[in-house]
Each structure stands twice: as structure tokens, then as C-alpha cells.
Image (cartoon, rainbow, N blue to C red):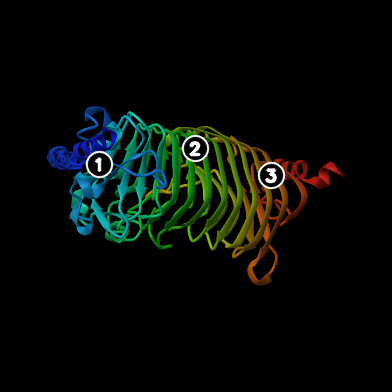
Amino acid sequence: MASSGKPTKLAFMAPLPLPLLALLFLSSTLEAVVGASNANDTSADGASYTCSSGSSRFLALPSSSSHSHRSVFSLDRYGARGDGRHDDTRALAAAWKAACASPRPAAVLVPNGRRYLLKVVTLRGPCKSTVAVTVKGTLVASPNRADWSDRDRRLWIVFRSINKLTLNGGGAIDGNGHKWWPYSCKINKGLPCKEAPTALSFHYCTNLRVDNLKIVNSQQIHMSVEDSTNVQLAKLSITAPGTSPNTDGIHITRSKDVRVTNCKIKTGDDCISIEDGTHKLHVSNVVCGPGHGISIGSLGDDNSRAQVSGITIDSVQLHGTTNGARIKTYQGGSGYAKDITFQNMIMYNVKNPIIIDQNYCDKAKPCREQRSAVQISNVVFKNIRGTTITKDAIKMHCSKNVPCQGITLQNIDLKMQGGKGNTESTCQNAKWRKYGKVVPQPCTSKIMGTFGDLLEFLLASDSWSSW
């Protein structure tokens, strides 16, 4: 009886795979219909899209994959062509909606070896679980400037209101900037000044991680972090020609608890620009140049109030930049920029290695003189060495009515490129101290028009304290 029972059991089990395959085939067919019906919106809002586990187009990868335990939503499964010519914006939006609505951790996959052309797209949260966007291939901006209206002219790819978003994959984001740069008023003085898109924007995100990406040739700013908290940016390569206008590398504003590490940034504007509302930012191991250096500001433009604090710039190399460590503010502003440290920096042929400019002006018409200013205080420049292409290696041009307070210069050695003479330093309305060796000697070229200016110089210098 036992031997006759086994064949009966095997005969009963053998047909099971066939109906199972049929069910899977039917499910896949239904999913194609569902995916096509939802791929019609370029503003992907996770809250407005729902799907059951039977209708979402995901592939559960095995544990050996980098997407272990994540449901993967590939752009190709949502109708993307990936040929760099056809518009794949809807495919990305649909894949995002499905991933954002997934009850389990999800990943949106941009497959390797292909170029996905995109117009303006906003990928919204909140999401039901964590989402990773893995860019293996290239996301490329539409070459047609008419695809942007005046309303969305400053944006291209936007992530908004998402918690625990990860963006990585080693692929590229290409802004097609050469289609925009000739129309900048900084290139063609006869044209009106208009904004252009930021390649990658993060608005109102928390616990954000962006790493191992290449961002190239943005229309203007390459990456902007705004109104976000607990952000980590690492292993990014950001590249545009040194002549490209307003192509800041990383722009940070109204955000706190941000870390930027191990990045290489070569652009036509600030490598990193730090603006109003930035608190507790730590930048380390960044290589910058060409570009305009690392800048706090501009702050206080159009008589606005600015608040910046807790900024540390550490272990940075600057190659051929127009500025090194810079703080820039407009006249007429208010607020503060305080508790700022620039340390362990190496300059290679930098034009303005250390500069505080409270008379900054980047307007079509000259800026008028005003009494109010953003208060700059408790700023440390420490362990900074290298070469400059101009004699004026340290500039502190501060407001007469709101002078710079608590400026520390420590262990600084800045020399002329090729040993062509001695470097100098100019100061105006700055209260400073130095520690250790500082070359050039601070404020040696100070323009002292009054006895008060002379007294300020003497009180600030080591020679007075040891007199």
C-alpha cells in the first residue's frame, strides 16, 4: 500500500506548475493595463495613488541583490523608451507613484546603459514605506527650452515632502545645460536676466541620503537642498565648464543637520553655496575647482533677514577658484552669520583665498550704501595654506555700522603663485585675533583714514597686546 501511495501523490502534484504559470501570466497582463492607465501624470503624488499587492508592477529581487528586501519598480516596466529622444517623464512618474504607495520598502530603478529624457517632474510624498531611487543609467533633460513655462522655470527633477528617501546608483543626471547657457544675461549682456532650472531639488525632505551619483551640465544650480532636515550627501561628482553661468554645485538653504562628504565639484559658480536658514552644516573632504569656491551667502539681499549658524568647512582642496573661504552679504540686510569655521584647507592658485565681503553686490545696477547689515561673528579661519594669484590673500571688508566681531586667524600660510612677491592683507571694520603663524600678517595693507581706524588696528593686533 505504501508503494502504491507514492505514485498517486506524485501524479497529483505534477500538474501544479501549469496553472500557476497561467495565473502569473494573467496577473502580468492585468498589471500592464493598470500601469498604462496610471502613467499619465508628471507630478507623482504618493498620497493620491493606491494599489494592492496584486496590481503593483514590482519585481522582488533575491537577498543577494543590492535591493535586498525591496520591491523594485523599473522605468522600463512603465513604458519608458530609454533612447534619449522620446519623453519618459510619465514612465518615471508612474514608477514613483507605485513605489511610493508600496507597503514594503521599494526602489525605483533607472536601468543601466540607457538615457531617459525628462521634462519637469515632481515626485511627491509622503510614502507608505521607504523608497530608494537607484540611477544606473542617465536621466537627461529635454533639450527644448519651451518645455519649461515661466511658472516652473526654476525646476527640473524635484523630490518633495519625503521621509527616508535614498538616491544613489552610480549613474548620471544630465541637465543639458549647453542649451541654456547662451541665453544667460551673464553670457549675453544684451539679454534680460532670467532664471533657469535647477537639475535636482529636494524640498521638505527628512532623513535624506544622496550618494554615488554624477550630476553634469545643469541648466543652473546642480543640486538644491531646501527646507530639509538630517541630510547626507556623499560621493557626488558634479561637473560643468568653468564658464557656465550660475551653475552652483550644491546649494543649501533653510535646512539643518546637513553633512557633505567626499565630493568633487567643478562648476562655473560656487562649489557649495550656503544661504539663509542653514544651521549645523558639516562639509568635509571636498575637492573644488574650477568655480567660485565655498561661499556663505549671499545673505541680506533686498533688505532681507538672514540666519546662518553652526557651519564647519573641513579638509577641502580648492584648485584655481576665484574665491576660497568666502562670506558675502549685501548692505541693508539684517540677522546674523555666526559660529563658522573654515579649517584644514589647501588652496592652489586661488584668487581670493580668504574673504569676508559685507559690501557684496551682484545686481544690474550698483547697490546703494545702507546702514544696516547682517552681523558676522565668531568666525575661525584655521590651518589654511597654499598659493594665490593675487597679492591680497586675506580680505575682511566689513560694515562700518555693523562691524565683524570675533574673527580668528590661526596657522595660515598663503604665498604668491611661483613665489612672485609677498602676499598682503586688507581689513576694514573687522575685530580679529591671530594665533600661531599667519602669512600674510593680518591687515598689513589696511587703509586707515582716521585715528579711530588706527586705534582699531592696534587693538586687534598681537603687537598691541604684547606692547
SS type, badge 3: loop
Q: What's the distance in space between the residues labelled 3 and 2, CA to CA?
A: 21 Å
Dot 3 surroundings within 10 Å: few (below 14), some, or many (20 or more)?
few
| Image coordinates for residue 120, horizontal then vertical, percent | 24, 45
Point 52% across, 54% down: residue: 293
| Quadrant of residue 444 within the rendered picture | bottom right
Counting every numbered tag in the picture gives 3
| Residue drawn at (29%, 38%) of the image | 123
Does 440 sit above or below residue 40? below
Q: Which residue is mark 3?
A: 450
Horizontal and vertical percent for residue 197? 31, 48
Front position in the image: 232 or 345: 232
| Residue 175: mark | none
Please state the horizontal and vertical placement of residue 211, each as a whole percent of the image.
45, 48
Residue closer to the observer: 20 or 4: 4
Q: Earlier in the sequence, mark 3 or mark 1?
A: 1
The quarter of the picture where the N terminus appears is top left
Does residue 420 appear anywhere in the picture?
A: no
Q: Position of residue 121 (x, y in %)?
A: 25, 43
What's the residue at 48%, 46% (across, down)? 273
Q: Residues within 10 Å of mark 1 (few under 14, many from 20)?
A: many
Residue 95 numbered mark, or none = 1
Tag nearer the camera, 1 or 2: 1
Mark 2 = which residue?
A: 370
Do the residues under discs 1 and 2 have CB atoms within 8 angstroms?
no
